Amino acid sequence: MTTTPDDVDRHIERWLPVVPDLDADVEGAVTRMIKLIRHLRTVKERVLADLDLPAHEYDTLHALAGRRGRAAPSDLAVDLAVAPASITARVDTLLRRGFVRRIPSTVDRRRVDVELTDAGQAAWRGAMEIQGAEEHRLLGALTATERRQLSDLLRRVMLVAEQPRAD
C-alpha cells in the first residue's frame, strides 16, 4: 500500500541524518499524536470562543454532564483537580449565566449539589457536537476495524504510561 507523505514524514527525513539511530516509527507515531492533540486543542479553543464559553466553564459543565448532570462541588473539585474554592467561583459564574443551579443534596441535607440546567446542557452539548464532528472527520480516514485497532493499540500504550517508571 502506497501512502502519501505528511509533514511528519518530512520531519523524520530532516532528522535521520542528524540522529541516524532515530526510530522512525516511534518518532512518527509520537509526533503525529502530538500534532493531532494540538489540532484538536485548537479546534476546541475556536469552538469555545465562538460559543463564548471559557474553557474552565466548559470543563465544569463537562464534569457535571459526566455525572449525569448533578454533583457535589467537592466531587467536581476532585474530577477537575482544582481547589474547592475554585469550584465555588466556577459554580457562581455558571449560576449567573443560567447554566447550573444549586439544589439540596439527596444524601446529606447539610450539603448543596450543583445541577445542570437545560441551558447548561445545551451549551455543553453544542460544544461537544462540534468537537465530536472534527474527531469523526479525522478518524473517518480509517475504517471501523482500523479505528478499533487504533483504539486497542493506544490502550496498550496507555497502560504502560499509567504504570510508574522503574528507574
Image: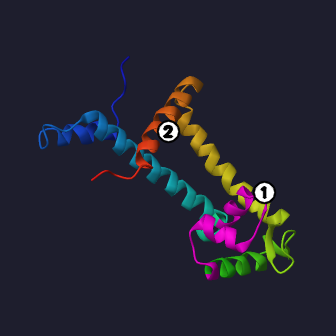
Label 1 element class: loop
**At x 66% / y 82%, what residue is drawn?**
89
Label total for image: 2
Mark 2: amino acid: Arg
Residue 22 lies, in percent from the top left, at: 19, 39
46 to the left or right of 16: right
Nearest the viewer among 165 and 9 is 165
Main secondary structure of the magenta stretch: helix
**At x 45% / y 49%, what residue is drawn?**
162
Q: Residue furthest front?
A: 166
Q: Earlier in the sequence, mark 2 or mark 1?
A: 1
Residue 69 lies, in percent from the top left, at: 79, 61
122 to the left or right of 130: right
Mark 1: amino acid: Arg
Q: Identify the disc placed on residue 8.
A: none
Q: Is residue 17 magenta?
A: no
Q: Residues within 10 Å of mark 1 (few under 14, many from 20)?
A: few
On the question of residue 52 being in view, the answer is no
Q: Is residue 110 above or below residue 166?
A: below
Label 2 element class: helix
The colour scheme is rainbow
Q: Which residue is mark 2?
A: 155
Magenta span covers which residues? Answer: 60-85
Q: Is residue 161 above or below residue 91?
A: above
Q: Identify the disc placed on residue 68.
A: 1
